[in-house]
């Protein structure tokens, strides 16, 4: 457990973690249901039992699941989205992020403006949509994604190690997570264009000197998902397997409020959607700077 893990192990961890989170978010693993056994998860995803155990430990630390010896793991938290939209109030299961992103990608032109601490949860959802495109289920002609992230030089209030000696490693972990997932997003969408599946793809990532107090999705200019980050104390698992105590925020588990623009410009949903789109545009234009360029990564990295 003490040795540093290779890039392949990290990628397997990220892939499995992202998929399990996405399945809990979209209701595949509903609240109160049991996850498959560790053996079944390892076989389905082609990863080691050690990777499965590390992912499950992180999900426990974040409060997504609880595990009991001999009883497996049970889902105790899901992404909560509150919506007054007619289609949401008619749904017995309630609205979740997965279907909202899926509906957005069923349009000929997809626009997503996202303000977030990291792009981890977004990466999981975009990869799911890429598989739908490759499977021929949806056929967007254009995908335009803009992501606003905090400036890497900014001293953020979270995640923050309770022991100051652990602070550099925790900051490094945050920057590494952000870099991995932004690169993954670029690669997934670039491949769709290269393969001729989506004729036009535009991905832009900028940094702003702001510590995100909330997460924001503006979807196709007509829907907004907005949710404040909730600060919690929890163990954070480093790549080495070591745990450190930290103040962190709920990302995928944060409650989101769903607002929809309608035909009446003065309706609450229309006003909120327009105001958050204007806020995003102002920060994007006036405060943010392009993502620093990184040297090309060797094949396989």
Image (spheres, rainbow, N blue to C red):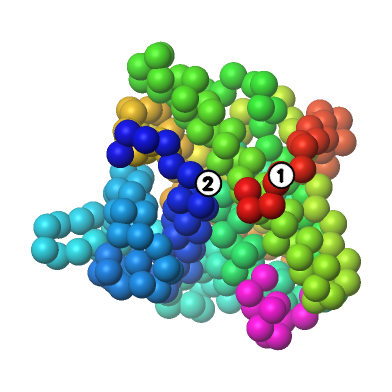
**In this view of the protein, which residue sits in the foreground, 196 or 209?**
196
Q: Which mark, residue 297? A: 1
Could you tell me which secondary element the residue under label 1 belongs to? loop
Which residue reaches farthest front? Answer: 299
* Residue pictured at 30% horizontal, 59% vertical: 49
- Classify 281 as above or below 195: above
Residue pointed to by mark 2: 7
* Left or right: 110 in relation to 35: right
**In this view of the protein, which residue sits in the foreground, 292 or 74?**
292
* Left or right: 270 in relation to 109: left
* Residue pictured at 59% horizontal, 63% vertical: 125
Upstream in sequence: badge 1 or badge 2: 2
- From mark 1 to mark 2, how far is it between C-alphas? 12 Å
How many C-alpha atoms fall within 10 Å of the one at disc 1: few (<14), some, or many (≥20)?
Answer: few
**In this view of the protein, which residue sits in the foreground, 49 or 243?**
49
Extent of the magenta region: 130-140
Q: Residue 263, located in which quarter of the rendered image?
A: bottom right
Q: Residue 20, located in which quarter of the rendered image?
A: bottom left
Q: Are marks 1 and 2 in contact (CB under 8 Å)?
A: no
* Residue pictured at 66% horizontal, 83% vertical: 135
Q: Picture coordinates of residue 39 (x, y %)?
A: 27, 69
- Classify 90 as above or below 290: below
Which residue reaches farthest left? Answer: 70
From where the camera sits, is residue 90 visible?
Answer: yes
- Classify 187 as above or below 296: below
Q: Picture coordinates of residue 184 (x, y %)?
A: 65, 53
Which residue reaches farthest top? Answer: 164
* Residue pictured at 37% horizontal, 28% vertical: 246
Q: Picture coordinates of residue 227 (x, y %)?
A: 55, 46
Q: The N terminus appears in which quarter of the rendering?
A: top left
């Amino acid at each position: 457990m003490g040795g540093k893990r290779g890039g392949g192990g990290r990628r397997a961890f990220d892939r499995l973690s992202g998929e399990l989170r996405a399945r809990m978010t979209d209701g595949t693993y509903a609240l109160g249901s049991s996850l498959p056994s560790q053996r079944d998860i390892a076989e389905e995803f082609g990863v080691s039992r050690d990777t499965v155990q590390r992912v499950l430990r992180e999900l426990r630390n974040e409060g997504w699941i609880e595990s009991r010896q001999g009883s497996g793991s049970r889902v105790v938290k899901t992404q909560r989205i509150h919506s007054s939209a007619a289609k949401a109030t008619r749904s017995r299961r309630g609205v979740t992020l997965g279907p909202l992103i899926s509906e957005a990608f069923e349009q000929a032109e997809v626009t997503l403006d996202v303000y977030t601490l990291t792009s981890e949860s977004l990466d999981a959802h975009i990869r799911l949509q890429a598989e739908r495109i490759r499977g021929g289920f949806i056929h967007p002609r254009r995908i335009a994604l803009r992501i606003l992230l905090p400036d890497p030089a900014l001293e953020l209030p979270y995640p923050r190690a309770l022991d100051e000696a652990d602070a550099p490693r925790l900051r490094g972990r945050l920057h590494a997570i952000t870099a991995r997932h932004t690169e993954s997003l670029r690669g997934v969408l670039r491949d769709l264009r290269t393969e001729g599946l989506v004729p036009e793809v535009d991905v832009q990532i900028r940094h702003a000197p702001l510590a995100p107090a909330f997460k924001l999705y503006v979807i196709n200019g007509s829907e907004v998902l907005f949710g404040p980050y909730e600060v919690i104390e929890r163990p954070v698992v480093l790549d080495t397997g070591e745990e450190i105590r930290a103040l962190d925020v709920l990302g995928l588990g944060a409650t989101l409020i769903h607002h929809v623009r309608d035909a009446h410009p003065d309706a609450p949903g229309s006003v909120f959607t327009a105001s958050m789109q204007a806020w995003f545009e102002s920060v994007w234009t006036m405060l943010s700077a392009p993502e620093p360029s990184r040297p090309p990564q060797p094949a396989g990295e």
